[in-house]
Amino acid sequence: MKNLHVIKVGGAVINDPLQLDHLLKGISRLAEPFILVHGGGRKVNEWLRKLDLQVNMVDGRRITDGPTLELAVMNYAGSLNKQIVSTLQRYGNNACGLSGADMDCIRAVKRVHPTIDFGYVGDVVHINHKSFSMLIDHDITPVCCAITHDGKGQLLNTNADTIASEISRALAPFYNVNLWFGFEKVGVLEDVNDESSVVKHLTKGSYLKMLADEKIHDGMKPKLHNCISALESGVRTVHICNVEGLLGIPKSAGTKITLK
């Protein structure tokens, strides 16, 4: 089977034009096909504050009311997605920007929680692997934002880490999938304030222990959950790293995560 890299980029990297450009220039030269998934939550937070609206988060996950959804769509599927696509085109990579509604590639349902109203937050229920395969097999790089749809005309805000994980899981039967989560830190840290405390290898068991010992930062919890879920579904490798780690693909960098 053909190798495929699913690369999720977020955090401060998205907010730093020079660092983002450096990353996109580097990965555009990858010899193997890739799918890029991007977040951009900090941009949405900036706009919420400019408009004097509240930022609501629970355990690292956003609560999305109507105005927040509108800002998310404008930023994720609009300006940010097109900036990334145009930069990849600049560096010779034939990229195509996608929300979940485009080509019906990612369907979700509005989240139902027993105690929390997450608003217009979507949980992925279907990845249209044929849409992604069609693009990949025609040497087109899909660039996915964090907006999905329910098939009934409603757009939904979905965690970008989850999207990357779900795409990886859906394509694992058809490609040798390697999943990469890139952000500003060198990897998973024992101490979020100490860059030298990187955990180079994390297993499912050690992850569960760190979780029980409350050593995992709230923002990292859903990311690691998605890593383990991807591995359990046949994804070949998962790494969490910074920009330089991503530029070293396919070599391992940052934190390598395995089941055992």
Image (spheres, grey):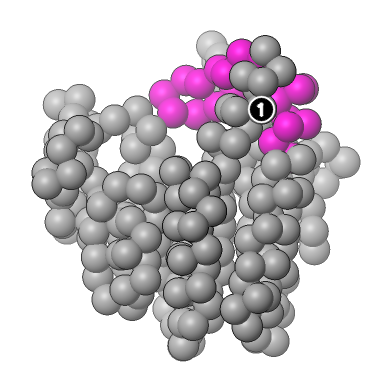
Residue type indicated by callout 1: Trp
Q: Quadrant of the C terminus?
A: bottom left
Picture quarter containing residue 144?
A: bottom right
- Residue 164 visible: no
Instruction: Examine the structure image and report whether residue 244 is included in the region drawn in magenta.
Output: no
Question: Which residue is located at x 30 percent, y 47 percent?
Answer: 185
- Residue 72 visible: yes
Residue 40, percent across and down?
57, 42
Against 215, residue 73 (above or below) is: below
**Magenta segment boundaries in residue numbering:** 53-73
Position of 72 with respect to 163 (left or right) is right
Residue 115, percent across and down?
54, 11
Residue 217, percent across and down?
29, 30
Q: Nearer the viewer, residue 131 or 18?
A: 18
Please tell me whether mark 1 sits on a helix, a strand or a loop.
Answer: helix
Picture quarter containing residue 140?
A: bottom right
Against 48, residue 76 (above or below) is: below
Question: Which residue carries the number 1 mark?
Answer: 47
Instruction: Examine the structure image and report whether residue 54 is included in the region drawn in magenta.
Output: yes
Against 216, residue 195 (above or below) is: below
Question: Which residue is located at x 14 percent, y 26 percent?
Answer: 213
Residue 7, percent across and down?
47, 63
Please identify the residue farthest to the front as the structure is shown.
18
